[in-house]
Image (cartoon, coloured by chain):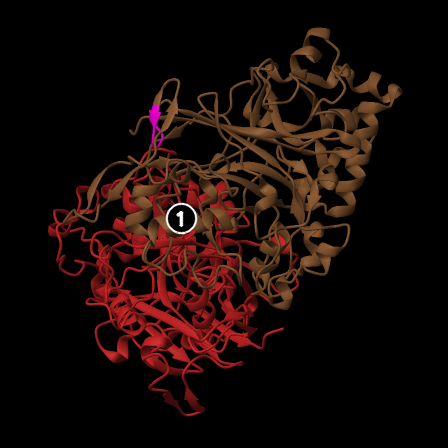
Chain colours: A brown, B red
Amino acid sequence: MSEQTPLDPAAGDTPGLPESDSIGLSEGDPFGLPEGDPFGPHNLPYGVFSLAGERTDQRRVGVRLGSYVLDAGAAAAALGSPYVSLLARPTLNALLSAGRTAWSDVRRALTAWVTVPSYRDSVRPLLHPLSDVTLHLPFEVADYVDFYASENHATNLGKMFRPDSPTPLTPNWKHLPIGYHGRSGTVVVSGTDVVRPSGQRKAPSDTAPVFGPSVRLDIEAEVGFVVGAPSTHGTPVPLADFREHVFGLTLLNDWSARDIQAWEYVPLGPFLGKSFATSVSAWITPLDALDAARVAPPERTHQLLPYLDDSAESATDEPGGYDLRMTVTLNGHVISEPPFSTVYWTAAQQLAHMTVNGASLRTGDLYGSGTVSGPSAGQYGSLIEITWNGRDPLELPDGKRTFLEDGDEVTLSAWAPGPDGTKVGLGEVTGRIVAAR
Amino acid sequence: MSEQTPLDPAAGDTPGLPESDSIGLSEGDPFGLPEGDPFGPHNLPYGVFSLAGERTDQRRVGVRLGSYVLDAGAAAAALGSPYVSLLARPTLNALLSAGRTAWSDVRRALTAWVTVPSYRDSVRPLLHPLSDVTLHLPFEVADYVDFYASENHATNLGKMFRPDSPTPLTPNWKHLPIGYHGRSGTVVVSGTDVVRPSGQRKAPSDTAPVFGPSVRLDIEAEVGFVVGAPSTHGTPVPLADFREHVFGLTLLNDWSARDIQAWEYVPLGPFLGKSFATSVSAWITPLDALDAARVAPPERTHQLLPYLDDSAESATDEPGGYDLRMTVTLNGHVISEPPFSTVYWTAAQQLAHMTVNGASLRTGDLYGSGTVSGPSAGQYGSLIEITWNGRDPLELPDGKRTFLEDGDEVTLSAWAPGPDGTKVGLGEVTGRIVAAR
């Protein structure tokens, strides 16, 4: 599969926001950002890039500013910064493993480099237009876990798949964040084509399974959390240590073949229905850029066991939810706007649960929130919910859709409230379906 | 957790076989193996070792001969072999990624080095007694998948957990090898202590879940297959290419907390009930050492879809099963002898299924067979089967057991038929339960 082609800087990737990228470009000054640019110095997400024609081993850490990418390691070297050892690297893993104090220090330095005039003169030649770079998978994924943390999503799927059940949620749902391990080797960067998977499926009326390309290929609009600092095998990570271990977040599309999944998943869970591809943004937004976006999670309806009980925390100024306003587009048409603030289980609870049995964290562990669905129909994060299992097709300018067709392109984007009324843009994640081989 | 301490060479690790190790040691000649030694030159499994007092970065590839370990990279260097680049390494990954032709060539060279008298003189000083070395996790685990391929095991669990179901197997079981992804970050080498996991559990009679150390901690006696050569994302690996990608196999204990698993696993499968630890042997046996152990798998009762249909293959001289005779000991007492030849789905079928949706393989991918259980009670690969969900406790000299108690030590060992009437020993995998933290 090809990696991401250069973005069209004029296209922007945050619907509903001012198209600042083109303004910045036309002025030819990377620091000439319009006021309110969602990728201003208050954001500074991290990625990995190379320039056209460079060899694979020329990949290096980049930091996004407007529609430019700062060669962060080169900037550190030019300014004599000690962080060159964390930034002049082919992936983010060295920075991720350095831990919370280093993350804050590096971010403070980067902020200075792009805001203090004397530094700006030094780093100006090290800023490359997004249109000139190729973006790569920004970190080596260790273990990948996917949760199922949106109550609306789990309720919708319960209604569809267990219509005879007295309650759409399984009995465990409100007591623990349900999750499972996915395939880390098929996590791909935004812009990578997704080959339609083939596999077994069996309709209830069929006497035997049939084999072929999935005919119910779906998206799952999620947020992925990236672990930086590892933990000790045998020792759980408490709720309060969330920010000591988690570096940042990224948009994530957990592509799902519903027909393959339905036939295979009892009793051991999803496998081939998910493992063909999971797309993440090329940009990892540090949690430090999202302090203004923290919100209380939904009210808990059940008393939680102590290791998951965040009711004390949520009364402080560090609540566990994040107010991320997500948008899903299909071939450029907005089809949903899932609100991440409605997700029941927080990322800190997911981390505490994932490690409560002593499982260790490694640098590069990635965990997804599960499909983000708000309470109303315009806020669902998957086509199976949007079309209610295919019953209510989407009417798009280019035709009806129940599930994805070959050639369809899906893009997830989002923004969050930033400091002082700004907006923090999250890097988009996009992928196009190509025909089964 | 501590890594494996030096083995007691006098103990042997293949019950029922001649205790050749002590004979070899007492003679002080690594080449003085008694006839029929299961770790003779016909075997030559690979591991990674260091000597007492060495730094972590001194780890290197070793090849087992009797009760000695050959420093393989040093031998290659001493003999001017080009394979030094594959063998003078801290893990097996370079060798794994080199592919089938290199695997055969390296094995042929190693066989010569330990059998041809002139080579023997050169490598003799590079053989270290097992008692002098520390063995490490021999490869970097990429993705870890666990299957559920033993019909007897799946039937036993179906009877226990779904007693009202008309059939103990789920409808998909005979059509595809059911599997799921596990946590690769908690795969540990034989000898590593296993901390008893804590988690949520809920008996049907409880009104809410409780939290605490698992009280139903179990083993799963499995065989793990190690992927060497990677595959292309989007392109399935057919049955016939199994040996192009899979380098070898190892014994594997997929520790399982049955109480945690029972409460969490609907609808997305096992998670914390398994992710706290998976133990593998320190030794990877190359498939090339097991040609004499190939046997036809059990007769197929259902017509398989073409990508899984091995009926043509099984009529050739390369059948898909392996005749591995496994033994499970608990605190030194034999509690079961699972026959791997009874497993329904072959490793080649598992590989073909795992990739049929286009999921790619990476060097270091590990997949387990699932618990190996034979048809009779003395052949079950888990305590939940041996004690029939705790109903029939095991009577051991040191007391009754339903599930594992703190301090219990479990060891899996195995042998397979080798060429010319020899036996091929597999490296044991052992682990001891320590109290929850």
Residue A404 part of the magenta-drawn span: yes
> Which quarter of the rendered picture does the N terminus of chain A lie within?
top left
Range of magenta residues? A400-405
* Whole-percent x, y for residue A365 in the image: 57, 47
* Whole-percent x, y for residue B124 in the image: 48, 59
Name the quadrant containing residue A309: bottom right
Query: Residue at 74% across / 56% down in the picture?
Result: A315
Q: Is residue B368 above or below residue B258?
A: above
Image mark count: 1
* Whole-percent x, y for residue B340 in the image: 27, 65
> For the residue labelled by badge 1, is the local secondary structure a helix, a strand or a loop?
helix
Identify the subunit bearing mark 1: A
Q: Is residue A257 above or below residue A111?
A: below
Q: Is residue A88 above or below residue B160?
A: above
The rendered magenta stretch, by its main secondary structure, is classed as: loop
B222 relative to B127 in the view: left or right: left
Name the quadrant containing residue A89: top right
B146 relative to A414 in the view: left or right: left
Q: Which residue is mark 1?
A: A157
Query: Residue at 18% across / 59% down in the picture?
Result: B297
B90 relative to A22 in the view: left or right: left
CA neighbours of label 1 inside 10 A, class few (<14), some (14 to 19), many (20+):
some
> Which quarter of the rendered picture does the C terminus of chain A lie within?
top left
Please tell me which residue lies in front, A338 or B276: A338
Please tell me which residue lies in front, B226 or B360: B360
Residue B102 visible somewhere in the drawing: yes
* Whole-percent x, y for residue B2 in the image: 60, 67
Q: Which kind of residue does numbered mark 1 sit on?
A: Leu
